[in-house]
Amino acid sequence: MIERGREEERDYFLRILDIIEETVFVIDRDLRILDLSKGCLNKIRNGVEREVAIGKGCYEGLWGLEEVCESCPVHSVFEKGEAARTERFFSLPDGTNRYFDIEWIPVFDEHGEVTRVIGDIRDITKRKEAEEKLAEIVDGSSIPTFVINNEHKITHWNTAVESLTGLKREEVVGTDRQWMAFYAEKRPVMADLIADKAPASKFKDWYGDKYKMSSLIEGAYEAIDFFPPLGEEGKWLLFTAAPLKDSEGTVIGAMETLQDITERKEAEEELKNAEEQCRTIFEHVLTPLCLIEEDDTISTVNKEFETLSGYSREEAVGKKWTEFVAPEDLEKVMNCYHNEKKEELPCCGFKFVGREGDITDVKVSIEHIPRRKIRVASLMDLTKLKREEELCAICEKLKELDDMKKNFLNAAYHELRSPLTPIVGYASLLKCDELGDKQRDYVSNIEKYAEQLKGQINRMLELARIDGGEIAMTLEDVSIPGIVNDVVKSFKPLWNDKEQMITTHVPEGIVVRGDKQKIIAIFTNLILNAIKYTNEGGRIDIMVEDRGEDIRVCVADTGIGIPEKHLPKIFERFFMVNTSLTRKSESLGLGLSIVKEYVKLHGGRIWATSEPGKGSKFFFTLSKKGEIRGR
């Protein structure tokens, strides 16, 4: 019964092999053909009877070979019980060359043992020829191109895409790693979406608004995007993916081409920046500008044109630019406007009519914008220009007068100082003669006032030298505690007579880099002023703070104080607060001006606070690094 069942099963199987057109054969462990379909005889061994092929090895019965095919997987299929697939190229007995895709399928008995293997053969000659032709096209193309099949495996990766991405074909062909060249993490590239026949929503998910359908290739998509992994600084690519179809129109893969448009994008960005800069310049330049279209209408104006015309931008746009020309000047301006001599820039003057009918004399220059049918008109306000020229002339005249004043004062100071020396000298000689007490007082007064006058003239000369940039600076390390101590001691008779108290708060070791004599002059002037303008029994505090980069000094007193309205002016030349004490001081108000200039020369600043009747505080800073500044 068992043998009869097997016989019936075999007859049924043979009837199937006779009916189907598929190319199928059955072999045993020794590779002997047990059965084969009519398709095998019709497509591979045409004209050969089934009985002739059965019993022979498959390499001989099917392919007409004398030896087993190289890398034949059949023994592995019998041992492992797993199907296998191979592609083979054969030169058949009829003289034709064919490519076959063979799937080897194990057949098991009731014990799970492989008893035979079915070979399912598909003729892929046309596909292989198409692939070879595609490979020739792709590999020979200078356009970076790669191809994937419908299993998302890379089948082609040309030299140009190697150069663009840095990935060699042997690294990627046969893999699904096409994403590695473009992205940091695995994700579909556009070719993957094409191979999957993905809907437009999927393209939007992955590419946002950067993609669009190709207008040249049916079923293709294209996009522009920036890829940081490419090159040292990333690249902009224009990429297009199109489906690959077989003869029946079935999508069997996709091809993606790439174009490096980095230079174009950079040029576009530069152009965009240049246009933005031009718009900014156009808007903010201090010259009235307007753009004139072919029909003589204004397309835009800048802020200066709005100011000149009295019209807002929205009101001016669309007007004929000739509406702003006074009727009597229209013919002259039109002749200038239509000047076709390319070597000359159309330029002429006319009366500009504003919104309220106001007239402004202007000069207009009109020039074509390259590669555009637009002209730009720039207008110069001659009235304003004339006023500016007049102001420049006045400034120049004032400078000359100022120079004359400085030269005169400088000469006058020198001339005034010259006779003082003999006056002081003769006064000293007279004191040596036998004089009465009254005459000796006269001589002492002559000497006293001559010395005062000499001091005031010297201060004037010092300011003149500062103004002329002739002041000399001798830099050295200056001990601030030493200077404060010396200056305070030098004035001891004065503050003792007024029964004043002077305290100093100066940390030891403070040293600044500066001109010692000028720093002494700063302290001398401020401390002397504090003594002068503080009443008997008052208090004066001198405080120095080391701030690292500089020092801050405060000279505080409990004197008469300064009204708030006068504080901004106390460092100006010849300014004196009008009080009974200042009237007695026999001063011209130059001391604080010189102090201010000396402080500025040492890279510092000076200021004061005060409250009338309660005293004043004078602050100044000095750089510790010898930072010297001009006026």
Image: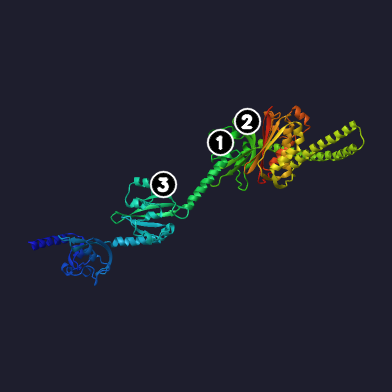
Is residue 373 among what the camera can see?
A: no
Category of crowding for the residue at label 2, using alpha-carbon neighbours closer than 10 angstroms: few (below 14), some (14–19), many (at least 20): few
Measured from the top left, where is residue 82 in percent x and y?
Answer: 23, 60
**Separation of residues labelled 2 and 1 (CA atoms):** 18 Å
Nearest the camera: 294 or 514? 514
Quarter the C terminus occupies: top right
**Separation of residues labelled 1 and 3 (CA atoms):** 42 Å
Which secondary structure, mark 3?
Answer: loop
Q: Amino acid at mark 2?
A: Asp
Q: Amino acid at mark 1?
A: Lys
Q: Is residue 553 left or right of residue 21?
A: right
- N-term mark: 2 or 3: 3
Nearest the camera: 184 or 51? 184
Nearest the camera: 279 or 381? 279
Q: Amino acid at mark 3?
A: Lys
Disc nearest the viewer among 2 and 3: 3
Is residue 411 among what the camera can see?
A: yes
Q: How is the image coloured?
A: rainbow
Q: Which residue is mark 2?
A: 358
Quarter the N terminus occupies: bottom left
> Mark 2 and 3 residues: CB-CB less than 8 Å, in contact?
no
Residue sitting at 23 percent across and 60 percent down?
83
Q: Is residue 415 left or right of residue 30?
A: right
Q: Which residue is mark 3?
A: 210
Residue farthest along the left direction in this orientation: 1
